[in-house]
Image (cartoon, rainbow, N blue to C red):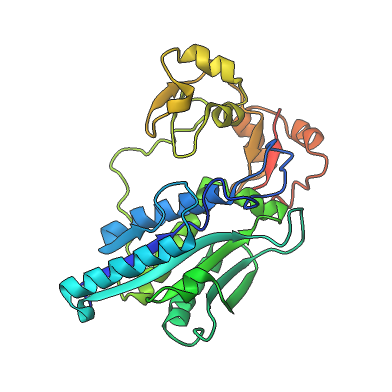
Amino acid sequence: MAKYKIAFLCDGHGSQTPGKRTPYVQELGRSIKENEFNSAVVDLIAAKLKPLGIIPILVAPTDADTPLKQRTDFANNTYRSYKDRFGGSNVDAVYVSVHYDAVSNSWANAEGITIYVYNGMKYKQSGLLAKAIGEFLPQGTKQQYRGIKEANFHVLRETVMPAVLTENGFMSSHWESMLMINKSFQEEVATEHVKGICKYLNVTYKEATPPSTPNQSVSQPTSGTHTIVKGDTLTKIADKYGVTVDAIKKENPGVEPTKLQIGQIIKLPSNIKPTTHTILKGDTYTKIADKYGVSIDSLKKLNPGVDPTKLQIGHVIKIR
């Protein structure tokens, strides 16, 4: 059994890659960039792999649009370096590229999960890796599983270790696009990838030990504060809590909006009232109404096109 097990993780595209985003989302007042999902999930995968003894290596650790050749060259060279140093039989590695699919720049009906391997590799090691991940990816949020397919993608063709590219939904599907920014969904997808990677590398998967103290969410509207996470801007934060950027600035006179630091805590205006809610697993209009102190009738009036009996995970509804 190999002593060193490595997972090279690729977040697909940079934050400014042209075209890699959803159509305009009316509820959010913006499009969602593919990188918002990809990078969040890759970071989660890396964090979950470490305690399991698998070495996570990000091939594009910044939000820049790192060229594909640079990504695969880095992975291949690092893999060879490990084998040269520790011996080929002591090193196992995989390459996993996380993506979100699309069929057009406008809303369409296509949806679901697809796993890709390079042409001719479906029944070889890359196919075994895809099969292992594919065992878990469909287990969470109910999505169509489109299976394992072959394609001539650079990251699959030019890597020297087993490689897969996962498409975890469609940006051109409205309901699946809303899953992209759903923290619970990101966590779910990351865990499913980790379970598959563990199975392929013959590593026993174990859930992370929960903290001894309650793990309070940093984004609860009633907390009075917000902890900066990757990709945050004052505009995003203001939209999230239903306040203005100027109101946040007044509460934080010493904060430089262009130099927000991950982990930094900022104050939120008092008496904030969120205006939207993203549907989570198990949500009902009754639960949502109780949570925000509104009536079920008001939710129905604000969301005339939404069927309360068919709430979709990731869909955003108005609450005020």
Tell me which residue sits at (62%, 25%) in the image: 242
Q: How many marks?
A: 0
Residue 319: percent from the left, percent from the top? Answer: 69, 32
Location of residue 20 with respect to 285 vertically, above or below: below
Residue 130: percent from the left, percent from the top? Answer: 48, 76
Residue 167: percent from the left, percent from the top? Answer: 57, 64
Name the image quarter holding residue 75. bottom left
Tell me which residue sits at (58%, 50%) in the image: 17
| Image quadrant where one finds the C terminus | top right
Tell me which residue sits at (44%, 20%) in the image: 256
Location of residue 52 with respect to 265 vertically, above or below: below
| Image quadrant where one finds the N terminus | bottom left
- Residue 240 horizontal side relative to residue 77, left or right: right
Name the image quarter holding residue 138. bottom right
Tell me which residue sits at (51%, 12%) in the image: 250
Front one among 50 and 7: 7
- Residue 83 horizontal side relative to residue 148, left or right: left
Location of residue 85 with respect to 140 vertically, above or below: below
Q: Is residue 4 visible?
A: no
Q: Is residue 65 visible?
A: yes
Front one among 178 and 108: 108
Residue 238: percent from the left, percent from the top? Answer: 58, 26
